[in-house]
Amino acid sequence: MAVTKIHPVKSTLKKALDYITNPEKTDEKLLVSSFGCSIETADIEFEFTRRQAMNKGNNLAHHLIQAFSPGEVNYEQAHEIGKQLADEILGGKYEYVVATHIDKGHIHNHILFCAVDFAEHKKYISNRKSYGMIRRASDRLCQENGLSVVIPGKERGKQYAEWDAQQKGTSYKAKLKAAIDRLIPAAADLDDLLRRLEAEGYEVKRGKYISFRSPGQERFTRAKTLGKAYTEEAIAERIKGKMILKTPKPQRGGISLLIDIENCIKAQQSAGYERWAKIENLKRAARTMAFLDKNGIEKYADLERKIAELQDAREKTTATLKNAERRLSDMALLIKNIETYRAFKPLYDEYKSSRDKEKYLRGHEREIILFEAAAKALKAAGVTGKLPDIARLKEGYACLSEQKDNMYSEYGKLKKSLREYDAVKQNVDSILSPVQQREQEKTL
């Protein structure tokens, strides 16, 4: 599991960079990487990029922290995940430094990136939407690397310590909720439930709010802090069978599954449930048949083949998109370095020809550092001799960027179509399986 948080850096950028790249925290800087800048001169390069923006805002950089659960990940894997996260959320347009700290009980990444991108010189917008993208990307990378993630939903906002305790089966709240869920079907009323909890060793405190304390627990837990399904009113309604919890998707296993089963049983005791279910099944069957007829799907094999084709098209589009994003990132970085090189080449020539180089350097140190960093990056990229034409590079970048946007639109359509066909297949399977089962029973 990785927990993420982000905050702006409004001052002391150099101090923040020195902190995250501390050799004692990063295995002598072996766990420090950068993109679009040099680790040693990132503060100067960030500021130069920022100066070129029309609307730069007040932030110098943004500091993203990605912390992993103790014992789940090794140093190198954590660092690689941090680089992948930075590449994905920043799109190859922002200079960044990523450092993995290993001096604490839990491994964590620090990602410090410029507040302005070097491709279009626009400031980074940090809000709920952008943070949601960071969180989703981090969770997906964790899943791809076999790490656990916090499942969003009813338990959103839960502290890491409590989440970790529940994962290990030691959460007082989790055990209390499980006990309440288990005893509700047998309880006559709320008082009866409380007596049953006391019989199991729970200490119950009655007052303005009902609170519980299990053996070994330091503080009481109020019922209302367990969630909407565990307030005094909700528990009373559940005992009477009047409360039906609405959950978007049943959870497989755990406390919520008990609640789902309990609600399902109570709902099916209703006289109108069977008639409602039949009508809903008929409506679903009709919608499924209309979809199949509209799209010319006559056989089950045709449906499977169509889904396979959509999956293949999605994978190819994904690969093409990633390739376009890499090319755009390379082009943006090349344009940045060429422009920096050209901007400070005359000054650097003056420095090289000056008689008192130390004096000249004291007055133009930042510019010379930027020139040397750009020259080094161009050499590493294999650019020698005459520099490429900036105007043509920018024209190519704009053209490829437009192609990428069109591919994203196509990718969105493929995803939507695939979801529709997957849903239709599930409907077909659920409609046909009872009929096939009855046919098999007849042959026995």
Image: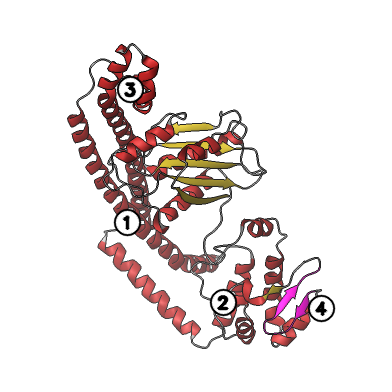
Q: Classify 300 as above or below 359.
A: below
Disc 3 is placed on an element classified as: helix
Residue 414 at what x, y percent from top left?
A: 31, 52
Residue 106 at what x, y percent from top left?
A: 64, 44
Residue that badge 2 annotates: 264
Residue type, numbered disc 1: Ser
- Foreground mark, 4 or 3, reads 3
Q: Classify 60 as above or below 218.
A: above
What segment carries the magenta color? 202-215
Residue that badge 1 annotates: 417
Residue type, numbered disc 2: Cys
Q: Residue at x 32, y 45 (%)?
A: 313
- Residue 213 magenta-highlighted: yes
Determine whether label 2 and label 4 are within 8 Å by CB. Answer: no
Q: In which quarter of the image is residue 320?
A: top left
If you read the primary sequence from the N terminus, does the residue marked by circle 2 or circle 4 appear first?
4
Alpha carbons under labels 2 and 1: distance apart: 31 Å
Residue type, numbered disc 3: Leu
Nearest to the observer: residue 271 or residue 247: 247
Q: Residue at x 54, y 77 (%)?
A: 245
Residue that badge 4 annotates: 199
